[in-house]
C-alpha cells in the first residue's frame, strides 16, 4: 500500500501505545506460568499478534476482552512450562508418521516479528516436541545463528537454513556452558526467559563476549527479579548463571507505553514546527529508547516532563529555533536510528549516529536504507560500517517524490514524519508495515 503525505504542522496530544518489547515478554511469561494471568492494555499490532499465535501453539489458552475495537486485556491460562500437555493437536500441526508412532509436529509462523522468533525459539527448547518456526520473507533472511549455536550446545536439537528460518527446535534443555555473542540482545533475553524452566539441577552458564542493546537485558532481568527467579550476573553482563527448577508466576499488570513508538510523533512535531504532548510514558521504565528525548534536548528542542494523574506521566516536545547537530551513540538504542536520522536532516550541519552496526541487522539494513531514501529528499549522508553521518541543510529539497518504505515499519514511520516538513507532497510505499508496531500512526499524522 502506498500513502501520500502533504506537508503540515503536527500538533496536539497523543496517547502512546503499549510497548512491544514488554507485551511480548509478558505474553511468553504468562504462557509459561501455571495458572491465569492478565495483561492489561497490551499492544495490539501485527508483531504482538504473531506472538499471541505462538503462545497458543505452546498450549496457552487466551481470552481477549475488548471495548469496541480496543483490546482491554488478555487473560492467559498458562501451562506451567509445558508440564501440562493438551491432548488436542494444534489446528495447524502436521501428523508425521515415524515408523509405527505418530508425533505432533507444530509449525509456528512468526510473520515479521524477530522478537517473537528469537524468544520463542528458546521457549520451544524446553520440551521434546519438534517445533518448526517460519516467517515472512524478511524473517527468512535474518540469521539466528549465534542463538541456535548456543541452544545446540545446551543439548537442543536444531535444524535451520544456514541460521535462518525455517528453523526446527527439539528439546529437552540439558544445560551446560555456552558462549553467546549478542549483536541483538534478544538472543540473551531468550535464554534468560527459558533457562529457569529447565529441569531442577540443570545449570545454564552463559558467557557473553558481545552485548548490544543492554537496556533490553535490564528489562528482561526486571521480570526475573519481579518473579523471584534467582540468577547470577556479572556487573558488566558478560556472564550469567541460571539454575533450572524455577517457575514463572501468574500476574496481573498493565503494559507500559512504548518509547520506541513515541519517537515518531515526537519527530513529526519537531520536523513540522508543531508541539505535541505524549501521554503514558514512564521516564523510570527500563526502555532504552527514552534516550530519544535526551537527544532532542541536546539538539535544542524543548522537552518538558510532568506527572499526569490519569496517565502517570506526560512529555511535551517542541522546536525552539535552529536544531543543533552532534554525535550520538545508539549502541543501546538502534531502533532510534530512522527517527533520529530524519530529525538530523533538518539540522544545519552534521549529525553522527555512531556505534550502531547492528542497525544493519534489523528488518532492513537501516543504515543503508536511510542514506538511500534521504538522498531522494536532497539530504547527503555518509555511511560508516557502524553508523551514519547526516549532512543536514536545515531543510529538504525533494528530488524524487516516492520513498521506498522497504517493508520496514520504522523506515515508513520515519519518512512519514519527514514528509510533514517537505516542500511538496511525497508518497511512501509499503506503508501497511507501520502496523507491525504502531497501528493507526499514519492516520494520526494525516
Image (cartoon, rainbow, N blue to C red):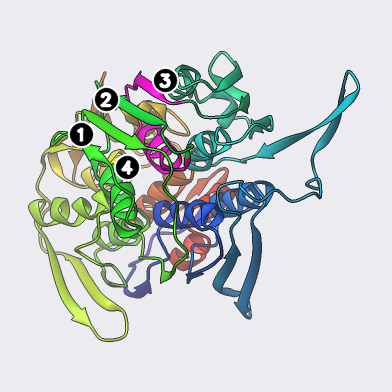
Question: Label 3 to label 1, Cα distance in Å?
Answer: 17 Å
348 relative to 25, above or below: above
Pointers 2 and 1 in contact (C-beta within 8 Å): yes
Q: Which residues are magenta?
A: 175-197
Count all numbered tags in the image, as a single digit.
Answer: 4
Residue 237 numbered mark, or none: 1
- Residue identified by numbered label 4: 397
Residue 353 painted magenta: no
- What is the x, y in percent for residue 34? 55, 59
- Residue identified by numbered label 3: 146
Question: Label 2 to label 1, Cα distance in Å?
Answer: 7 Å
Residue drawn at 51 percent across, 58 percent down: 30
- What is the x, y in percent for residue 183? 33, 26
Question: Label 4 to label 1, Cα distance in Å?
Answer: 45 Å
Badge 4 or badge 2: first in the primary sequence = 2
Question: Label 3 to label 4, Cα distance in Å?
Answer: 43 Å
Residue drawn at 46 percent across, 31 percent down: 364
Asked if residue 278 lies left or right of residue 96, the reply is left
Question: Label 4 to label 2, Cα distance in Å?
Answer: 45 Å
Question: Nearest the camera: 437 or 230?
Answer: 230
Q: Quadrant of residue 445?
A: bottom left
Q: Quadrant of residue 20?
A: bottom left
* Residue 404, visible in the rendered structure: no
Which tag is nearer the camera, tag 4 or tag 1?
1
Residue drawn at 19 percent across, 63 percent down: 284
Amino acid at each position: 500500500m502506498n500513502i501520500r503525505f502533504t506537508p503540515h504542522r503536527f500538533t496536539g496530544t497523543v496517547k502512546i501505545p503499549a510497548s512491544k518489547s514488554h507485551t511480548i515478554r509478558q505474553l511468553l511469561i504468562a504462557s509459561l506460568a501455571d495458572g491465569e494471568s492478565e495483561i492489561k492494555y497490551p499492544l495490539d499490532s501485527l508483531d504482538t499478534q504473531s506472538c499471541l499465535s505462538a503462545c497458543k501453539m505452546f498450549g496457552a489458552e487466551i481470552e481477549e476482552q475488548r471495548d469496541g475495537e480496543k483490546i482491554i486485556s488478555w487473560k492467559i491460562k498458562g501451562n506451567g512450562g509445558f508440564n501440562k500437555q493438551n491432548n488436542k493437536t494444534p489446528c495447524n500441526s502436521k501428523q508425521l508418521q515415524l515408523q509405527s508412532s505418530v508425533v505432533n509436529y507444530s509449525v509456528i509462523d512468526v510473520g515479521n516479528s524477530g522478537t517473537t522468533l528469537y524468544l520463542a525459539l528458546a521457549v520451544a527448547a524446553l520440551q521434546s516436541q519438534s517445533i518448526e518456526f517460519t516467517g515472512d520473507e524478511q524473517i527468512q533472511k535474518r540469521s539466528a545463528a549465534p542463538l541456535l549455536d548456543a541452544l545446540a550446545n545446551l543439548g537442543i536439537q536444531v535444524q535451520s537454513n544456514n541460521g535462518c528460518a525455517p528453523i526446527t527446535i527439539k528439546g529437552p534443555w540439558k544445560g551446560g556452558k555456552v558462549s553467546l555473542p549478542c549483536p541483538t540482545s534478544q538472543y540473551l533475553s531468550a535464554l534468560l526467559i527459558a533457562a529457569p524452566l529447565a529441569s531442577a539441577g540443570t545449570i545454564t552458564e552463559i558467557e557473553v563476549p558481545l552485548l548490544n542493546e543492554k537496556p533490553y537485558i535490564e528489562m528482561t532481568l526486571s521480570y526475573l527479579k519481579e518473579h523471584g527467579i534467582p540468577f547470577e550476573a556479572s556487573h558488566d553482563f558478560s556472564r550469567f548463571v541460571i539454575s533450572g527448577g524455577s517457575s514463572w508466576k501468574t500476574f496481573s499488570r498493565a503494559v507500559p507505553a512504548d518509547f520506541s513508538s513515541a519517537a515518531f510523533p515526537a519527530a513529526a512535531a519537531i520536523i513540522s514546527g508543531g508541539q505535541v504532548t505524549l501521554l503514558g510514558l514512564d521516564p523510570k521504565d527500563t526502555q532504552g529508547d527514552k534516550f530519544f528525548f535526551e537527544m532532542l534536548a541536546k539538539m535544542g528542542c524543548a522537552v518538558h516532563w510532568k506527572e499526569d494523574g490519569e496517565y502517570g506521566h506526560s512529555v511535551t516536545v517542541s522546536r525552539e529555533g535552529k536544531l543543533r547537530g552532534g554525535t550520538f551513540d545508539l549502541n543501546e538504542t538502534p531502533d532510534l536510528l530512522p527517527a533520529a536520522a530524519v530529525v538530523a536532516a533538518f539540522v544545519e550541519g552534521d549529525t553522527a549516529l555512531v556505534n550502531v552496526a547492528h542497525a544493519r541487522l534489523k528488518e532492513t539494513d537501516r543504515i543503508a536504507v536511510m542514506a538511500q531514501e534521504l538522498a531522494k529528499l536532497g539530504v547527503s549522508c555518509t555511511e560508516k560500517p557502524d553508523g551514519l553521518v547526516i549532512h543536514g541543510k536545515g531543510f529538504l529539497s525533494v528530488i524524487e517524490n516516492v520513498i521506498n518504505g522497504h517493508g520496514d515499519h520504522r523506515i515508513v514511520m520515519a519518512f512519514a514524519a519527514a514528509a510533514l516538513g517537505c516542500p511538496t507532497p511525497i508518497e511512501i510505499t509499503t506503508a501497511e508495515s507501520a502496523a507491525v508496531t504502531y497501528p493507526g500512526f499514519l492516520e494520526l499524522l494525516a
